[in-house]
Amino acid sequence: MLEEARRGDTSHVAADVNARTTQLTDDEIRERMSGNICRCGAYPGIVAAIQEVHSGRQTARTWGFADERQLARVRLEDTNETV
Amino acid sequence: MRPFDYVRASDPDAAVRAVAANRQAKFLAGGTNLLDLMKEDVERPTALVDLTRLRLAEIRATADGGVSIGAVATNATTANHPLIRERYPLLTQAIVAGASGQLRNMATNGGNLLQRTRCQYFYDTAMPCNKREPGSGCGAREGINRIHAILGWSESCVATYPGDMANALYALEAVVRVRGPNGRERTIPIDELHRLPGDTPQRDTNLEQGELIVAIDLPPSRLAGNSHYLKVRDRASYAFALVAVAAALELDGNTIRQARVVLGSVAHKPWRSREAEAALAGQFVAEASFRRAADAALREARPLQHNAYKVELAKRAVVRALMRAGRLT
């Protein structure tokens, strides 16, 4: 798919089939991946992974578990004991 | 599985001879429709003649200013070819609206024209179907007919032609070049390639056994610059159309000199609406003109039990496609 984009192949979501845009938006990736059926909830991660490889930038949402020190700060600010 | 012979054709005439000699023989190109139908036991050929090695994949400019596209060129190659993108963007749009990237890489132009209906009753060999088994009845006529025809159907068949590419080719007035068993070529205006069902829904096209599509010729077009292909379906991608519209306009300032309006997935063949085209000729490029054309296109519509929605959907799709073609949206 990335090779097709590099050589300028168009897609159904292109506004102009003669525009040689080789930078893929998430919509472009979704359209170009639509023949790959994955019957689970993994699509957003797949789109993000392709976008990362394509653009060379980290685009996926990054997160991690808060450590005890961060949790303590939140409790202090929020006084919400359930946090 | 039913056994069948496989032959790789060395040249077009040999392929034609092999299929003409055996009524149970079929041409095999990309196989994206035929192999599925064989797995479902809908198609039961005793021999397949593989065309993919034939030199029929050329896409070239013709002396009259048009383009000729080879029958076994793939959909993907055709859609992305510079001559097609520049001269017939409507065709590129239609092709990339169909199937998926993988399928377009396999599917050929000739095969695409000859794809068979997606009627569920045609696919289900436990059901009656006059197209699959003439005389057995039509399961869809009184069955679940949400995806079926609203125009041109008969009591024996309410199936639709499912493709996208052909809708654009009808709007572009393509000509299909066919090689026959007598070694000669004949040309068929694309509007005369597919048939309405009538009493013989088992025949999708006017091709005779063994006749081989070798190329699709596109004449030069004055409408290509103002065209749009609109596809409406149940999901955003990788689905057949519920309604599709290929629209193209030749403009003289703010006036429509001539128009093409072809509806897809509403009939047994791509439905070119000369009524809509006549309603547009000489009119201003304006939404009101497009609405009148849409009404004209659907005036003869006869919906079935579950597809009355297609009539209004098709009208709105015609208006929207013309708005895009006329660059009003």
Image (tube, coloured by chain):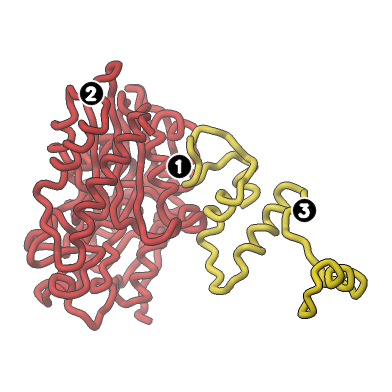
- Residue positioned 23% across, 56% down in the render: B310
3 and 1 marks in contact (CB < 8 Å): no
Q: Colour of chain B?
A: red
Q: Earlier in the sequence, mark 2 or mark 1?
A: 1
The foreground one among A52 and B137 is A52
SS under mark 3: loop
Q: Which label sits in the foreground, 2 or 1?
A: 2
Q: Which residue is mark 1?
A: B79
Q: Which residue is mark 3?
A: A58
Q: Which residue is mark 2?
A: B284
Can I make out residue B34 in this image? yes
Q: Circle 2 marks a residue in which chain?
A: B
| Quadrant including the N terminus of chain B | bottom left
Between residue B232 and residue A80, name the one nearer to us.
Answer: A80
Q: Quadrant of residue B280?
A: top left
Of A83 and A6, the residue lying toward us: A83
Name the side, left or right, on which B134 lies relative to B167.
Answer: left
Residue B190, percent from left and from top: 23, 42
Do marks 2 and 1 share a subunit? yes
Marks 3 & 2, CB-CB < 8 Å contact? no
